[in-house]
Amino acid sequence: MLRSRAAALALAMTLAFASPAVAQSTADTAPSTGFAPVQVARGAHGMVVSQDALATRAGVAILKEGGNAVDAAVAVGFALAVTMPRAGNLGGGGFMVIHRAGKERGTDTTIDYREAAPAAIDAGSFLDAHGAADPRKSRNSGLAVGVPGTVAGLALAHEKYGSGKFTLAQLIAPAIRLARAGIPVENDLLDSLLLASPRLAQWPSSARIFVKPDGAAFVPSERLVQRDLADTLSAIAKEGPSAFYSGPLADKIAAAVQGAGGVMTAQDLHSYRAVERPPVRGTYRGYDIVSMPPPSSGGTLLVEILNILEGFPLGDAGRQLGFDSPRALHLAIEAMKLAYADRAEFLGDSDAVNVPVDRLISKPYGEKLRGEIDPTRARPARELRPNSPALGVGSGGNTTHFSVVDRDGNAVANTYSLNFNFGLGLVAEGTGVLLNNTMDDFAARPGAPNAFGLVGGPANAPGPNKRPLSSMTPAIVLKDGRPAIVTGAPGGSRIITAVLQVILNVIDYRRDIGDAVAAPRVHHQWIPDQVVVERTLPAATAAALEAMGHTVRIGPPSGSAHSIAAVDGGYEGAADGRARGALAAGD
Ligand code: DON
């Protein structure tokens, strides 16, 4: 019934919000009452889903002109830097997972364009005079800014995996037009500017663009024009990424960071490289999982958790543990805890430290951890790893994900970020480029939580040129070598568990992608020892989890997981309505 209802929505190509009711037959299943709004679209040949309608349309236009998924993704990535300044960016970084269709099963790769620490950062950079972690340094000063990777990453993706039919300049052109002509201030942009204007107003270079001259925030129907950003984009279009990483733009970025108390130099920008890395791969009930290796923890944890869960009977058939049932959620939560404990201890930048990815994603290790789970009781978090070096002595952010597939079956899952809403909030004077505050993703010292409450140890200690550990989890799930699901999400520490639940909802619970994205999400990250649930989770389910020993806290909506699934005769895209203004549109 759900499938046909969602299919009807999709066929109508409706922009209306779907909020399906869920009927379950198993006694173990509490009825789900609340679903996030989701816009579903269908495409016979391809699909783009992003947080912003203008950016989605820029991507679809490239697909229609014969571009491949990578071409479209690059156009979307640059467009979002204009239309979604809180997270779309040139001054931040991220990760792209690419599936290339081929004769056999195709090939997969990833591009790591995570921000890097400047060469002058060391293990003590984010501590105060007493050796305690100092969040002002890692979140609110120039020290927080990592060397931006986005321009290098998108350019590398285009150069190596674009169709060859478009120059980089052609893919940047829509972004330049949007920056120069201005964009309507509405939906997510309006919401985010209203929230962030006090922080943006601290920096004159930012206030000039994002706050009106009288200090007031924008109101609906006004336009946001970004002339400096248009000039920066034009320079990149004309000269390539070197326009950003050397010369006047690099000088201006380094000067802005130093002016705010940071240590980044023009040489740091000049030395920055996006890196192509083999993906982390796993399998789950006959599907292949392809996602991001370190310096993101996303792919490793996703595969580790799926390996643990593979041995449990999750599903809606007779004796299985049904959708959203307290017992199924309990098992997922216990698996999350174990994996996040490993994250805190072992994960970091694998170019700087040894990360045992192969062991963590192996089936025998998943089986061992499965054996540690009590199917009826929550285990206290500290009991799992009492001696973890990540225990030591004991805000809102922003990121955005978009998914693309094309007519040949190529796929891109891309998540990129400034870390907080508008990053540090600082625009490098004369560039229009907002700078990230991603250095807060390092463990400033063992046991000191970052803004997302994540702890870590020496593996994720700050160091020169090191990339801080991320949770971004752009993921492509393949069936018989073809993309079955393309997904990812923002949400800081909650990214990995959001992506996990979208995948479980499709594979185990046979939900279509709209319902899979809409369903309530739960999250546990080991420390703090609590399950954060969305308000849409039925109260009876939360109470049942508490009865099993979990501490349940209602949190804000989990990140917007803009996703695509293959369906008969094409693709279905789901724009997650947890933030306003997202659009799925088909080719
Ligand atoms: O890389 C990370 O894990 C974080 N910097 C992501 C931040 C984020 O998702 C904030 N968005 N809501």
Image (spheres, rainbow, N blue to C red):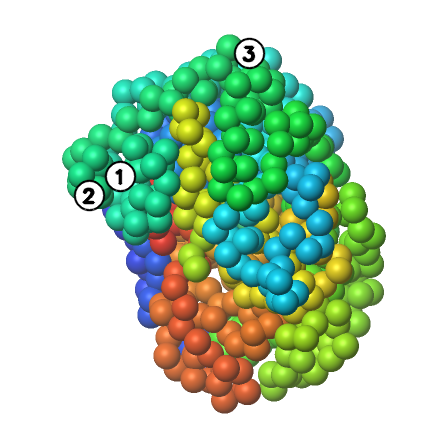
Count of all numbered marks drawn on residues in the image: 3
Report whether residue 132 is seen.
yes
Amino acid type, label 3: Glu
Q: Residue at x 75, y 60 (%)?
A: 458
Q: Which residue is mark 2?
A: 216
Amino acid type, label 1: Val
User: Mark 3 or mark 1, which is nearer to you?
Assistant: 1
Task: Calculate the distance from the C-alpha at mark 3 to the C-alpha at mark 2.
Answer: 37 Å
Secondary structure under tag 1 reads: loop
x and y, in percent, of residue 364 in the image: 82, 65
Task: Calculate the distance from the C-alpha at mark 3 to the C-alpha at mark 1.
Answer: 31 Å
x and y, in percent, of residue 74 in the image: 52, 26
x and y, in percent, of residue 161 in the image: 64, 23
Task: Calculate the distance from the C-alpha at mark 2 to the C-alpha at mark 1.
Answer: 6 Å
Secondary structure under tag 3 reads: helix
Which is nearer the N-term, disc 2 or disc 1?
1
